Image (cartoon, grey):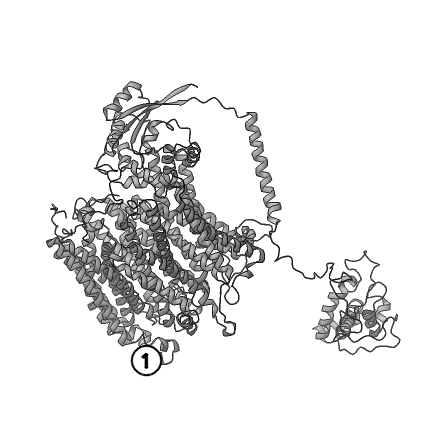
Amino acid sequence: MEKKLFGVAAIFTTPDDIINAASSTVKKGYTKYDVYTPYPVHGMDNAMKLKPSKLGYLTLGFGLTGTFIALFFMWWMMAMDYPMIIGGKPFFALPAFIPVTFEVTVLLATLATVIGMLTFFFYFPNNSHPVHDTSFMKKVSSDKYGVCIECADPKFELEGVKEFLTSVGGIEIEEIYYAVKTEQRIFDPKFITFLIGVAIATSGGIYFALNKLMYMEPFTWMQTQQKLSAQAETKFFTDKFSMRPKIAGTVARGFIPYEYKGLALPPVEIVNPSVPDEKNLALGKKKYLTFCSPCHGNHGDGDSRLRGQFPNPPSLHSLKVREWNDGNLYHIIVNGQNVMPSYESQINVAERWAIVNYIRVLQKAKNASPEEIEIARKEGK
Amino acid sequence: MSEVNYDYKTKELPKSVFTTGIALLIIGTVFGVIGLYLDTQRFLLNYLLAFALLISVGVGALFLVTLEYVAGADWSVPIRRVTEFFSSTVPYLLIIGIPLLFNIGSLFHWSHPEAVAEDKILQSKAPYLNTTFFIIRFFVVGLLWTLFWFLITRNSRKQDITKDQVLTKINIRYSAIFIPVFAITISVASIDWIMSLDPHWFSTIFGVYFFAGTVLASLSAVTYAVVKLFENGYLHPKITKDHLYSLGALLFAFINFWGYIAFSQYMLIWYANLPEETFWYLNRWEGMWIYVSLILIIVHFVVPYSVLLSQPAKMDPKRLKFAALWIIFAHLIDLYWLIMPNYHAENSNPWVYLLEFAFPMAAIGVLCIVFYLSYKKSNLLPLGDPKLERGLKFKL
Amino acid sequence: MKIDYSIEAPAIEGRLSLSQIEELIAKPLDSKPDKKFLLALSISGSALALGALCVLLTFYYGIGLWGNNQPVGWGFDIVNFVFWVGIGHAGTLISAILFLLRQKWRTGIARFAEAMTIFAVMTAGLFPALHTGRPWLDGYLLPYPNQHNLWVNFTSPLLWDVFAVSTYFTVSLVFWYVGLIPDFASLRDRTTSKIKKVIYSIFSLGWRHSHRNWQHYEKAYMLLAGFATPLVLSVHTIVSFDFAVSIMPGWHATIFPPYFVAGAIFSGFAMVVTVLIFVRKIFDLEHIITVNHLEKMNKVILATGMMVGYAYAMEFFIAWYSGNPIEQFVFINRAFGPYYWAYWIMVSCNVIFPQLFWIRKFRRNIPLMFVISIFVNIGMWFERFVITVTSLHRDFLPSSWGYYTPTLYDIGILIGSFGLFFTLVILFTKALPVVSISEIKAVADGAQPSHHGEGGH
């Protein structure tokens, strides 16, 4: 393998010598050189005439970035995207955000300092630097101090440098060589295969983690409990229904059995016992909208959104229905008619009559004569 | 033991320091007396504010001296005398506080028996908050401070002549005892004089809060004096910017500490939202006080923090001087914010606001006079201190 | 003993040469583990195994295995968490604050204390994770746009803990690693083993002791120290917020933040002393970790112990001063209620025993300081127990009062946490240099130029 000269290194034994050597090197006009010491020697910055480190600006910049990122995101998450009142505090509760802001600032600033130092200032990792694995390095790594003047220096001249280093007290002068690297191609098939492998492994890993791993439960005691789910099939009961039917012969409070069940219309007129006052009509409206409107529509026109899916529910404004007495309407609610099921178990007696009253109101509203409208208008005033 | 002869003689301080001090004190007193005529309560609260400032600087300086002994620091030895000069305010505190003792009734709500009689909370506090015990505490605390001040500074001055290392050892002992004593006494003083102005309110961190302000005030007084002396060549020539850096760094650290303590107190009360605590902050959030509260954050934390953040700023005499004066000003605002919301009377006479300037002026006048007088009495360099040489050699 | 104040106490004793220092520190890494090491490891490993078993059972059956129940919903888990986070504070304090204060004596102990910080924070982090019951779902603690369309609650102190502890762990680790880089380089250049050389090369990143690097390195170290200092305060402050932002009497006290920080330093230093006493003996580091260093640590223990005492006293006083009967009851209940024993263990271990350190002889007496440091550890554990349990067990509603007793699983996990911590510490002593090689070299006799600061201008 071809070897090229990197520079000439010399060893010094005391800290005073190395300070002296460093300042002499500067005086001599060398610029491409470095001083190697096993620990930071005080006063060396001055001797080498180094400019103060600019690392602090990086830290400051990233620290402030952290501050603003944290504040911005907390504002956005807590006050804009999903505002929620927590503990009676404002959405943007600044005092409560300060701890996290501080932590993010510190985290970003330290990471930036260290990563920035290692990469931008040191060009690390660099295990192939020529001084590695030389006897020079072994010494400065332990208890000696060294100077290395590099070939790249415009004033470099092998014998002159050696002489200079000896003159300032350097011992064990050593020439440092490095092996010339063979050129590496980017489109090397091995390299491309490696890249593709890495890409597949990374994306596969992420896919697995986010889509599979996240849903794998090591222990599911807490989620899977023995319970009945209202609409689901169960193995617990032989009929597989989770919801249990009423036990035959039981009567719920407020649901006295209806005597004309099964007949098309009641044989006698059932008298409406309720008074259609404001409260009663409000109840009727509420129950009508809950139970009746899904088919008959909000205004009794039979125009609900279910129209078309079943035999059309009839309008409640037909002459037939308008001329029926209240008892007939009551009977249909309890008994059902054609496709309409019985609402006996959902709606109690008082509510049924309230619904009847409300239907009467709807009918009146739709089919009032002009005189009646006139009267209503006057009364309304 | 090293016997070093220092080629150093203390230069005399210009008389102008003394005359400025006297002038400030006289102007302050004159305006103060006018204020007394206009509004007694406001006068007393302002007097209390000046008194609290002197406690901060004087006792704080004594604490800094003892801290040096206990921590075994060497960099601060060559400038310790400056700190000691400021601590000479301590014995005068006993005298300055006495007029307030005669006016406990006008300052403190809890001292009115008729108020206590109809207030259950005050009744339960009566064993602590009563006039007799208050006066006893004042004298015990004041005498303890004076005692330690006397012992420590006397030994320090004696060492100039005897150069005896045993004196350092003794002072370390005194200091070690003083620090816990200081922790208790400064808490008692802050609870008595400031927290009990609003006798219903309580906060466990209050002593620490006042301590943070105390250290800041005394440290900035010391920093200002040291930088002034440094610039005008009064200090030993071996004292360099590295020493100033340490002062700047300490100031910076305590700015952060104050911010931390102030935030902790506010945050916990804000978060828990208990009416028995929040009213204290709400009082400081009403009317014009909201501005004082917000200004306090900026003046006491944001500005000095930004000024002292960078490393060169901590050793730059100009910026340090600015920061030091600024922090004393900030501490005054802090004290104002703590004390003045307890003023309840209505007074439309605009001249009464002169009081707000009169008392800080008088207090600073007192500091100048004390500094001048104690400067005259002793060396600026503790010549006999065994750590002096180490201190002079101090490098970053 | 007479002290000459005009001379600065040397950071290391005996005039060791630079190569001797390196030899001494690197020795444990080059030698095979001896019987004592294996014995220690097996003891700590058994404790760890016990803890692991209890943790697994807790995963399987849920945290119903623990003693936590109404009204004491926070038990050993939080006590242990706060305890271990507290232990973790000494390391950063020594490496950052004492660095900024230019205390040279820190060099001998900084590396070890930092390692203890990292291990302690790791141990601490375990407990909140366990307490969530289903730790595999803890990813939701991070604010990322998840499938539930929910953000985390940034006003919750428990979430601040997530940020604080993870930041603290990351920063401590980075700080520690940055300190290790030059040492890895030195080890790389002295080792004869090929495998070790590869490992050290990777971790040294190619460090070559260049002064152009040292300059930035020193700056970075200072910046990191500058950040780590407020960070270390913030972490235990935030831990204290967990308690103090509530309206629970006994928890809601404004002094909690500085009080917790002082307590953390106190317990952390005690733990460092406990461990260092052994380390310096076993690895012949008596010249590098000297009695002077231990004495200084004991002084810090004394000082922080008194700060903690101040906080106890202040809490008691203000509870009375507040005039709030519930507040008063809680504190009377602490000292004289059913958990009086825990309270008095806390007070005697934390406030009374450390007072012995007023006497110089005791500060320098190794067996005694060992005993006291153990007492402080016990006391600080009980402090957290007292705060957590005594405040909760008798809350506002007397009908729901109760008495908390830990179960065997709680105790098993506590033992396991010590097992984890000490296992990591023991492994660390054999894997990495326990003292910073480059820093010790820098403070050795004659390591710095004789006229530094004046030369070279």
Q: Position of residue B118 (x, y in %)?
A: 38, 80
Image location (x, y in percent) of residue C107: 31, 45
Left or right: C453 as drawn, with respect to A131: left
Residue B144 shows in this picture = yes
> Which quarter of the picture shows residue A346?
bottom right
| Left or right: B79 as drawn, with respect to A335 | left
Label 1 sits on residue: B113
Q: Looking at this view, is C345 or A57 the one in front?
A: C345
Q: Position of residue B49 (x, y in %)?
A: 28, 65
- With C326 as the anchor, is C135 left or right in this view? right
Q: Residues within 10 Å of mark 1 (few under 14, many from 20)?
A: some
Chain letter belonging to callout 1: B
**Amino acid type of the residue that numbered disc 1 sits on in the rendered structure:** Pro
In the rendered image of this protein, does residue C385 appear above or below residue A263? above
Seen in the picture, residue B292 relative to A208 is either above or below; the reply is below
Quadrant containing the N terminus of chain C is bottom left
